[in-house]
Amino acid sequence: MKSMEGIRRYFTWAGFRAPDLVLHVIETDEQLRAIVRAFLVDFADLSFPIHRPDRPHRYELIQVPSELFRRVLRHRLSWEALGGVRILRDPDALNPDFWSHFKERLPAPLPGSEAANDQGLLPLRRSG
C-alpha cells in the first residue's frame, strides 16, 4: 500500500461504485498532524483525480493515521477497524452506502493473497 498502484488495486478489489461520491483520504502520523500522503478517489469511474470534480457530488474526507489505514487495506479488514478517524462531509450527511460497503460488504480476499492468508482462509501446509 506504499504506492498508488496498491491503492488502485485495493479499491478495484473492494468493488464499491457510486456515481456521485468522491473520497478524500489524508494519511497522517499517529497524532493526525503531519500529512504522509493524500489522494482522492472518484467512485464514479474509480479514478484518482488531483482535484475535486466540477460536477455535483458528495464528498467524504477521512483523516487517518497512515500505518493504521495501510494495515486495514493490506489485510482487507473492515473499515470498522479504523476507529477514531476524523471525518468531514459535504453535504454534512452520512453516506450509508459507502460506509456499509467498507464495513460490512467487502468481498472475500482472493485465495493466495496476503490478506487471505492473514485471515486464515488458506489451508496450512504440512511439512514432511
Image (cartoon, rainbow, N blue to C red):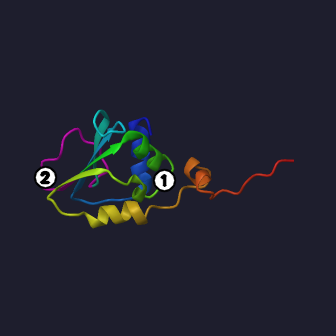
Q: Earlier in the sequence, mark 2 or mark 1?
A: 2
Which residue is disc 2 drawn over?
55
Q: Position of residue 96 (x, y in %)?
A: 28, 66
Tell me if mark 1 has few (under 14), some (14-19) or many (20+) residues whose alpha carbon lies within 10 angstroms of its own. Answer: many
Q: Is residue 122 left or right of residue 81?
A: right
Q: Is residue 88 magenta?
A: no
Q: Nearer the viewer, residue 87 or 48?
A: 87
The residues colored magenta run 44-60
- Under circle 1, the secondary element is loop
At x 30% / y 66%, what residue is drawn? 97
Circle nearer the viewer, 2 or 1: 1
What's the mark number on residue 52?
none
Q: Position of residue 77 (x, y in %)?
A: 47, 55
Q: Nearer the viewer, residue 11 or 69?
A: 69
Res 63 → quadrant: top left
Is the stretch drawn in magenta largely helix, strand or loop?
loop
Q: Is residue 48 magenta?
A: yes
In space, the residues marked 2 and 1 are separated at their CA atoms by 31 Å
Name the quarter where the N terminus is drawn. Answer: top left
Tell me if mark 2 has few (under 14), some (14-19) or many (20+) residues whose alpha carbon lies within 10 angstroms of its own. Answer: few
Which residue is disc 1 drawn over?
76
Q: Is residue 123 left or right of residue 79?
A: right
Q: Position of residue 7 (x, y in %)?
A: 40, 43
